[in-house]
Image: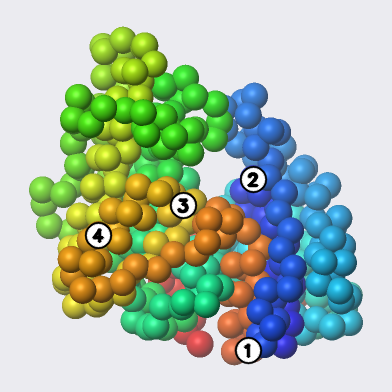
Amino acid sequence: MRILGIESSCDETGIAIYDDEQGLLAHQLYSQVKVHADYGGVVPELASRDHVRKTIPLIEAAFEQAGCGPESLDGVAYTAGPGLVGALLVGTSIGRSLAFGWNIPAVAVHHMEGHLLAPMLEDDRPEFPFIALLVSGGHTMMVKVEGIGEYEVLGESVDDAAGEAFDKTAKLLGLDYPGGPLLAKMAQQGVAKRFVFPRPMTDRPGLDFSFSGLKTAAANTIRSAGDDEQTKADIAHAFQTAVIDTLAIKCKRALKETNIKRLVIAGGVSANTELRHKLERVMQGMQGKVYYPRTEFCTDNGAMIAFAGMQRLKAKQYAPLDMKTQPRWPLDSLKPL
């Protein structure tokens, strides 16, 4: 079977064609970073307009890359939520309309399920069950995964997501948008332990996250410590270390509570090299293993939507004719296969 995947939940237009025997045949991605950089964050209306301009040309490029056409498809998958409602409507209307026009099934995909299953695109795939740490600009959550669609959310952020906290702190440091990767790069020049920030919500039971207070601590330090480049780098190092330590502590706690030895990290923040190294050390100490997608599939992309859509297509969980989007969509409300 072969499926077209469309991702348009935020500020990246991702298109992919996935074959259940041959694997990923095509992968096209357009990032709107330059569109939103002047505003210091995503402008929803501009994001929607850019998806309108880019989605069809990227689909045509994907067909050319894969060497096939619509007649070879068995379905169309699109991100139906969660995300920016206008951006979701673009991908949903295009995906559902193409499926109708080509007389093939459509599949509505949960954006975070796409991230959660992204490591399945690699040769070294995790077996079920596993614990998944989903960390991105909009979400931070710990999920127990028994199978596709069998998700139990063990904990999630009560305020800012980890990626959001990275971007906001980077902005306070005077870095351009998107600031998370730039902060991580700046942190490489920082001196360890000059500044020490709290590891929020690690001194109490539970697996929820909170990064708003950590961001505030960084903001207060930035205002009081000076703005020379070394001081900024030291603050960036301390902030990144605090976030990574917090995520690692929570992961270790979840693994111990569930007695599971496999950990998946996915989402944009999972591309952070220091986070990967930290969790690899944690899993080595627990005689377990950590899995993550290649860097290009950590951020939003069409490949993860195509793969997740393929699983739903095989289970005949088709989308109805109405074009429904869900800007808020609990992950644990999904149907198991």
Q: Quadrant of the N terminus?
A: bottom right
Q: Position of residue 21 (x, y in %)?
A: 67, 87
Q: Could you tell me the amino acid type at mark 2?
A: Asp
Query: Does the CB distance between marks 2 and 1 fall below 8 Å?
Result: no
Q: Earlier in the sequence, mark 2 or mark 1?
A: 2
Residue 314, numbered circle = 1
Residue under the point 21% across and 74% down: 287
Q: Residues within 10 Å of mark 2 (few under 14, many from 20)?
A: many
Residue under the point 27% across and 40% down: 241
Image height of 237 relative to 278, above or below: above
Residue 180, numbered circle = none
Q: Earlier in the sequence, mark 4 or mark 2?
A: 2
Secondary structure of residue under mark 2 = loop
> Alpha carbon of mark 1 to alpha carbon of mark 3: how far?
30 Å
Secondary structure of residue under mark 1 = helix
User: Residue tagged by mark 3?
Assistant: 271
Q: Position of residue 34 (x, y in %)?
A: 69, 33
User: Residue tagged by mark 2?
Assistant: 11
